[in-house]
Image (cartoon, helix red, strand yellow):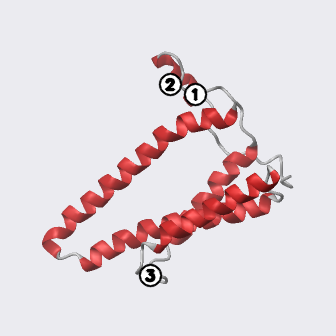
Amino acid sequence: MFPNQDIDFPQNDRLPQKLSLLGNSIFRQKKHSPETFRYSVFYQLGVFASRSSVALIRIHRLWILPIIQLINMGIFFACVYRTAHIPSIWLVFGLVIFEGLIGGGAYVNTFYKISIEIPEPDREFSIGVASISDSVGISFAGLLAIPLHNAICQ
């Protein structure tokens, strides 16, 4: 599927074992394909590119970005629902990079708008609220991903 199958990115296979010391592991021990880790690299490349580009491209209507992310998710689901797989790994890589671009763009443009539009006395508080809400959202998504991952992998 991928021309360089011998390339393997670093991974933390010990995390489920470390967490199992707390009792019954909430993770199932399953070896994932190398593409799973490549998806993460491509996603992070998209995030890096978009977070580095706020000086070149500024998005003023931030509400558009979640809509684009939903459309991207719809494309993924349509491909999988229609054919039970996505026909090309390069299409998946493209969609994953696009998702990273949109996610990173939303993040950097939100904080850029706060730094420009919020008055100086309220700016620090606004950035703190945005940072905490970002962390809570990531934590909620991580907690939701555990049972969802187990359900998908069965």
Amino acid carrying label 1: it is Phe
Question: Would you say 114 lies left or right of 87 here?
Answer: left
Which residue, given by chain and number where applicable, does mark 1 sit on? 27
Amino acid carrying label 3: it is Arg
Q: Residue 109: percent from the left, percent from the top?
A: 41, 73
Q: Tag on residue 75?
A: none
Does residue 57 lie above or below 152 as drawn?
below
Q: Residue 30: percent from the left, percent from the top?
A: 69, 29
Label 2 – label 1 distance at C-alpha: 8 Å
Quarter of the image where the C terminus is located? top right
> Do labels 3 and 2 touch, CB within 8 Å?
no
Q: Answer with the quarter of the image where residue 12 lies.
A: top right
Which element is circle 1 on?
Answer: loop
Task: Please report whichever mark, 1 or 3, sits nearer to the chain's N-terminal start.
Answer: 1
> Farthest left residue?
121
* Residue 52 visible within the image: yes
Amino acid carrying label 2: it is Leu
Q: Which residue is drawn at the image coordinates 55% and 30% (left, top)?
A: 15
Q: How crowded is mark 2: few (under 14 residues within 10 Å), some or many (20 or more)?
A: few
Q: Residues within 10 Å of mark 3 (few under 14, many from 20)?
A: some
> Do labels 2 and 1 touch, CB within 8 Å?
yes
Q: How crowded is mark 1: few (under 14 residues within 10 Å), some or many (20 or more)?
A: some
Q: Which residue is drawn at the image coordinates 65% and 59% (left, top)?
A: 42
Question: Would you say 81 lies left or right of 139 here?
Answer: right
Which residue, given by chain and number where applicable, does mark 3 sit on? 58
Q: Tag on residue 19?
A: 2
Which element is circle 2 on?
Answer: helix
Task: Please report whichever mark, 2 or 1, sits nearer to the chain's N-terminal start.
Answer: 2
* Residue 48 visible within the image: no
